[in-house]
Image: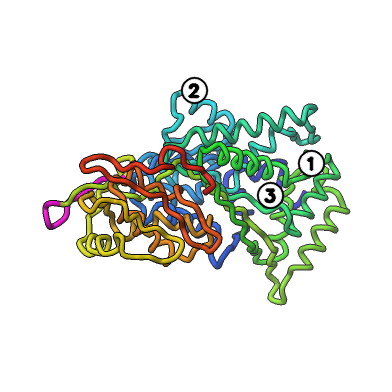
Amino acid sequence: MTGGGAFRAVYEEPGAYDRLLLPHYFQGVDDVGLVDELLDRRFGRPSGELRIVELGCGTGRMTSRLAAHARRLTVVDPSPAMIDRVRVRAPTADVVLADARDALTDLLSRGRAGSFDVVAAFWALNYPLGQFFETMTADAVRPVDDMPRAREHAAGFVRRLVRLLAPGGHLLVLYFDPDTPEQQLVTRMWERIAPFPGRGPPYPLTVLLDTLRQEEAAGHGDLTHTRYAGAAWAPDRAAAVAWFDGVHFKGFPALVGDPEVRAEVAAIVTRYERPAGDVVLPSGVHVIDFAVGAIPSGICRSGRDDAGGGADVRGPRGAPSVRRRGRLRRGLRLARGRDRRPGLRPGSRARRSATVGTCDLDALVDAVRALHHDHGLTLDTEVAHAVKLYATRSDVDAAVRLRCFALREDGGLDVPPVVVEPGSSTRSRSASGCSSTP
């Protein structure tokens, strides 16, 4: 037996996972930093106001980051050893000792549908999705007999994840890239035991993305999917070999005891070993964000500011109050109806007596960042467009739907005309029928 230990020791032996885990780096930060950036982009600075469930929390490496944003945090993992560790890292979290599939069924049966602002699964969804297609013991890997039915059940699992989300909520996923040299070697070795379902390790990822695209097409939310290249770093050859044996092969006896497998692992470690003796394995991650609801998190409610100094307004789902800034109010008034840039109709039909929805500039920037991923706009252009959208509408909640526009071939945004009646909510032609893919 090698440094990987007994079968599944990485999940069941206290301290094994943290000892064997190699740090992974993407975009200049490790994977924990990547989660930090993802949370900051979506929700801004930690407010402690979100309702979050993390599936497959492991030893809680990401949990502490989620806890800073959470009013209530629920964590789920089937390993007692890992749950014991996460209790230390996040002592205020509600802990559920169960696999993701059972926990999801339990949450929905207890009426928790639509009750979470974040459903998170970092490096964890490949396990519950893969279990729909095969089972593994210390002796064998057994594919299921009815693959089409297994795919239907896996897709249903993904749809039920989406059901947990409240309006404006996000399903946030980190999923390993199955096409890197490291993962391709792991695939070849496991296929010595049994073939992977479908088209191999990418198949559960394909099911996940296909199902979320179907949810998007049905108008249930917006999918953002990005792949980042990166690297896993091992301080020496022994750590790299233990990573393969303990984590990738899970101490499976037929693999870690096979001389041909040992030779394959030694070859890839040698290939990526550096003169200093450390090993840098090419890696990759798929970052998946499925956002439910038409109004991005962070948008403030509209209202008239007659107090001069500015009043507090509350954001969606009881978010913290945001102070209206005088300079932003003046900027919105100046922006209203004054820009005739090609491709953007500034809403000149809006009556001048209408109340202008206002919000904190930082919240505005956070609210429109998602447009960059969908339409390739620069952040400055996004802010300019969003300010005009705010400045030409009366009721933010009813009418400022950032998805209710068309992207023109010249790169401009075609905004639906708006008619404002004094004292009434704003209505646009597409307000009741926004497409999830403008």
Direction front: furthest residue? 349
Which residue corresponds to mark 3?
A: 247
Which residue corresponds to mark 1?
A: 196
Q: Residue at x 46, y 58 (%)?
A: 413
Q: 10 Å neighbourhood of mark 3: few (<14), some, or many (≥20)? A: many
Name which of mark 2 and mark 3 comes first in the sequence.
2
The residue range painted magenta reads 306-315
| Type of amino acid at the residue the image marks with label 1 | Phe
**What kind of element bears circle 2?**
helix
- The alpha-carbon separation of the residues under discs 2 and 3 comes to 33 Å
| Type of amino acid at the residue the image marks with label 2 | Ser
Image label count = 3
Instruction: Please say whether residue 85 is visible from this viewpoint.
Output: no
Question: In the figure, is residue 58 to the left or right of 430?
Answer: right
Q: Residue at x 11, y 52 (%)?
A: 307
| Type of amino acid at the residue the image marks with label 3 | Val
The vertical placement of 65 against 93, above or below, is below
Magenta span main SS:
loop
- The alpha-carbon separation of the residues under discs 1 and 3 comes to 18 Å
Which residue corresponds to mark 2?
A: 109
The vertical placement of 341 against 157, above or below, is below
Mark number displayed over residue 46: none
- The alpha-carbon separation of the residues under discs 2 and 1 comes to 32 Å
Contact flag, marks 2 and 1 (Cβ < 8 Å): no
**What kind of element bears circle 1?**
loop
In the image shown, does 131 or 400 lie closer to the viewer? 400
